[in-house]
Image: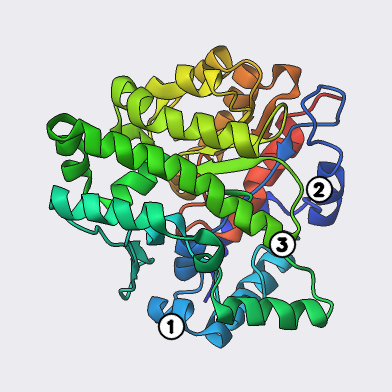
Amino acid sequence: MSIVEKEFLELTAALDPASFWMENEACEAFTEGKPRCFFSFSPDDHWLFEFLDVESTVAYYRDKSCRDRLHREANQVTLEYVGKAFFSEDTWFHEPKRIENLFGSEYAYLESGTPWLQHVTEDPAEFADILDRAERTDLEAWALSDDYRAEWTKRAAAGQPMPALGTGSRGPATIMTSVLNPEILFIWAYDHPDLIARFSTILARKMVELNQVFRRFSGNLQPGWWITDDNSALFSPTLYREYCYPVLEYVLDELAPGDALRYQHSDSAMGHLMDQQRILGINQVNYGPEIDVGEIRKTMPDAMILGQMPPFLLRNAPAGEIRDRVKEDFAKAGRGGGLHVTTAGSLAAGTGVGRMRWMMQCAQEDCRYR
């Protein structure tokens, strides 16, 4: 049973989703010469599980037929109420390797949760050996399994639309704290700084190498890079500048040169790192809900802000508080057209289509330029 929230359906009886999304197509640019702020939702697997009350999360990740069926069920509901489908109904059996896999980190699958990358070691000598192996690995041969290549060939031969690979990844803070336990990482940053500096250096080089493999394979010639780095808030400005900034600087220079997209997402309170993000040339941001949208605009005047509706406010608050927040964000950061109305992070699990419709209606009525 999906989450509908009938009281919000009554509030949005006059909303026409088809017209809303049609107008939305003219609203994306960073300018006031458009009808209103651009609008988007980002539902993910956490949201899907609660929205459909999924019995087995492991089956969702392991079984393509189960995954596609759940995607169809969710899309039927969101198309009816919100006017948009958010999930692929023909997911892939196989995936390319991840940069974390290069350092020995693999996913664990547990019921009632999403996959979790496992820490590889708490022994600095063993980790030095892991870095040696990562440095020697030929990514051209390693990155794409035979099974993935075969699935790609089959889908391409059938004339299916093929994905552009090498467009982005998790950021260095989250990669490092997935490969290593965060406590171990920060202890080693002081006790074994050369080891962590080497980790950072190899990570930067191998991230570029890996994604150049992906780009060549998929024929992706479009520059640009997206970053999801929830754990960046764990780093002080000093540690971020020493170990994360150099990775991003190198990756962005190689994969997102000039005015290309440089997008940073983080659910966390990483406001203390915004100055460095600005210097890195990040030009689209989706930061954690604790960061005031006015402060983002002040620190990063040229960045398109995607947010800042707190996901739990949308899920839990009465209608008036949701509307007040939409209006407040627009007043603080809407000038110039550099605000997209969306949640600061993905939709919170438990958010239903009624509340989604209400947020759409608030943006339509209260975030207009003409």
Q: Which mark is residue 59?
A: 1
Residue at left offset 50%, top offset 24%:
277
- Give the residue type at disc 2: Phe
Determine whether 34 is above or below 131 in the image: above
- Give the residue type at disc 3: Ser
Q: Looking at the image, is mark 3 or mark 2 nearer the viewer?
A: 3
Please provide percent x and percent y for residue 330: 65, 24
Q: Looking at the image, is mark 1 or mark 3 nearer the viewer?
A: 3
Res 93 seen here: no
- Give the residue type at disc 1: Ala
Mark 2 surroundings: few (<14), some (14-19) or many (≥20) residues within 10 A = some
Quadrant in the rendering for residue 362: top right
Where disc 3 sits, the SS reads helix
**Residue designated by label 2:** 20
Decide which of tag 2 and tag 1 comes sooner along the chain.
2
Please provide percent x and percent y for residue 319: 55, 42
**Residue designated by label 3:** 218
Residue at left offset 70%, top offset 65%:
85
149 or 321: nearer the viewer: 149
Please provide percent x and percent y for residue 94: 55, 76
> In the picture provided, is 292 more to the left or to the right than 176?
right
